């Protein structure tokens, strides 16, 4: 148990003070057990009262919190009701009977939740929590792409705005992108598919299929910064470490890794294989959150922070619940078309094997056509 010799009383923006009392300590003890390797006792004394109050407000207001894998541990394990990747969170929210959804993630995720749960109130704690990848393309861009490549199906990564989803044929995730591309080619009777907006995801998919890929030059500002040299340095320092990369990384990074896949796939890899040492080539908080369940694995930390994800804090989650800010809305006409693109993906049978971007390392480099 934590010592109560120091009684911090952090003040919320509305002037309400929270004290770290024995009752708060008891209420938050399960969460503390999960985060104590990554949060200091002093930090926890400030965080635990907010966590307890947020959890009380959730019950009072009939709300749930969707915590993305890139949230910091005190959010992910302290107040998250559903934890995972963006699409998984939105699907869980759609099943929930709660009236209010608080998106502990970025704006396109909140939009996806609203698209799949149009009758629920969706809140995002900070409107500035955006995404470089989602911002790289607009609905108008997609309309121009379709004019340039008439008759070709447009596959859109879920990391996009509702406006972009509404202009496309079917969505994909990093876990099922190969399956969706091949199914779209089959249904449209073509050998070329447009896969937007992530250039690196498109390049990594192209190495696993005979379908020709037309791509957009969108990139995640977190994953594009990783290099093959980073992995070489890791291997030199830690020869026994297993390296897992997200497919939004450059193709040469994926090729240098031992395994690549979505955040959910990386989580499953660690929990199933139980490596002694592992490196997750993705956003920093991912490792902290997986480590709570992988206590025998040492996580190395050559990661990059997402400045947008880090805009979400316990403080603004509390304010979102207390004051109902900031509500995310989607034009019903856009939402209906975007929902169709997502639903087409959801209706596909699960892939026999989730995309593992390391399985084609021996394959010759396959280029894509960049728009």
Image: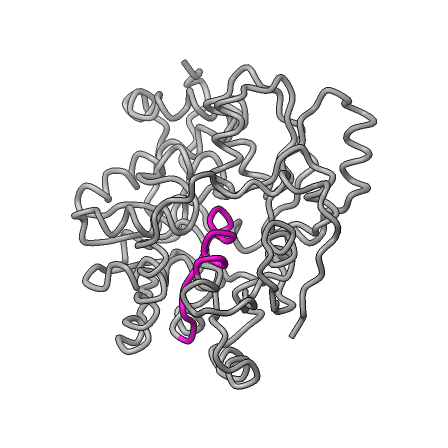
Give the x, y percent position of residue 280: 62, 35
Q: Give whichever of 202, 1 is nearer the camera.
A: 202
Q: Where is residue 168 in the image (x, y as percent from the top left)?
A: 43, 72
Is residue 36 among what the camera can see?
no
- Residue sitting at the far front: 189
Q: Is residue 32 above or below residue 357?
A: above
Q: Which of 184 and 305 is in front in this view?
A: 184
Look at 37% across and 28% down and name the residue there. Answer: 20
- Residue at left 73%, top 41%? 362
Q: Position of residue 93 (x, y in %)?
A: 27, 49
Does 18 sit above or below residue 128? above
Q: Which colour scheme is used?
A: one colour
Q: Is residue 220 visible?
A: yes
Count of numbered circles on the image: 0
Of the 4 image quadrants, the one containing the C terminus is: bottom right
Q: Quadrant of the N terminus?
A: top left
Residue 170 falls within the magenta-colored stretch = yes
Residue 97: in magenta span: no
> Percent position (x, y) of residue 311?
50, 53
Horizontal placement of 81 versus 221: left or right?
left
Tell me what residue is drawn at x 48 percent, y 24 percent.
271
Instruction: Give, as a single range, the part of the protein colored magenta.
Output: 167-183
On screen, 301 above or below 37? below
The image quadrant that residue 257 belongs to is: top right
Left or right: 349 as drawn, with respect to 236:
left
């Amino acid at each position: 148990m934590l010592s109560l010799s120091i009684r911090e009383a952090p003040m919320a923006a509305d002037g309400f003070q929270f004290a770290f009392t024995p009752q708060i300590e008891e209420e938050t003890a399960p969460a503390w057990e999960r985060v104590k390797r990554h949060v200091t006792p002093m930090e926890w004394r400030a965080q635990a009262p907010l966590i307890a109050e947020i959890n009380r407000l959730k019950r009072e207001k009939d709300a749930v919190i969707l915590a993305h894998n890139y949230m910091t541990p005190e959010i992910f394990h302290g107040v998250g009701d559903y934890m995972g990747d963006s699409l998984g969170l939105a699907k869980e929210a759609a099943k929930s009977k709660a009236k209010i959804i608080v998106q502990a993630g970025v704006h396109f995720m909140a939009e996806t939740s609203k698209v799949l749960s149009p009758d629920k109130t969706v809140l995002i704690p900070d409107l500035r929590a955006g995404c470089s990848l989602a911002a790289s393309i607009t609905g108008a861009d997609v309309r121009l792409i379709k004019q340039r490549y008439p008759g070709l199906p447009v596959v859109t990564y879920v990391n996009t705005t509702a406006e972009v989803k509404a202009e496309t044929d079917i969505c994909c995730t990093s876990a099922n992108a190969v399956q969706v591309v091949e199914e779209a080619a089959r249904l449209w009777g073509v050998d070329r598919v447009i896969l937007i907006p992530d250039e690196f995801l498109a390049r990594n998919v192209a190495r696993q299929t005979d379908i020709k890929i037309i791509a957009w030059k969108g990139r995640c500002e977190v994953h594009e910064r990783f290099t093959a040299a980073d992995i070489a340095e890791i291997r030199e320092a830690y020869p026994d470490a297993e390296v897992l990369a997200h497919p939004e990384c450059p193709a040469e990074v994926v090729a240098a890794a031992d395994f690549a896949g979505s955040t959910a796939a990386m989580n499953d890899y660690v929990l199933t294989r139980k490596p002694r040492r592992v490196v997750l080539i993705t956003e920093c908080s991912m490792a902290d959150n997986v480590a709570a369940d992988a206590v025998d694995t040492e996580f190395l930390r050559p990661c990059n922070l997402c400045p947008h994800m880090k805009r979400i804090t316990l403080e603004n989650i509390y304010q979102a619940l207390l004051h109902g800010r900031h509500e995310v809305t989607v034009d019903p006409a856009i939402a209906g078309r975007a929902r169709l693109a997502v639903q087409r993906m959801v209706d596909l049978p699960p892939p026999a094997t989730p995309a593992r971007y390391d399985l084609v390392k021996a394959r010759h480099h396959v280029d894509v056509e960049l728009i």
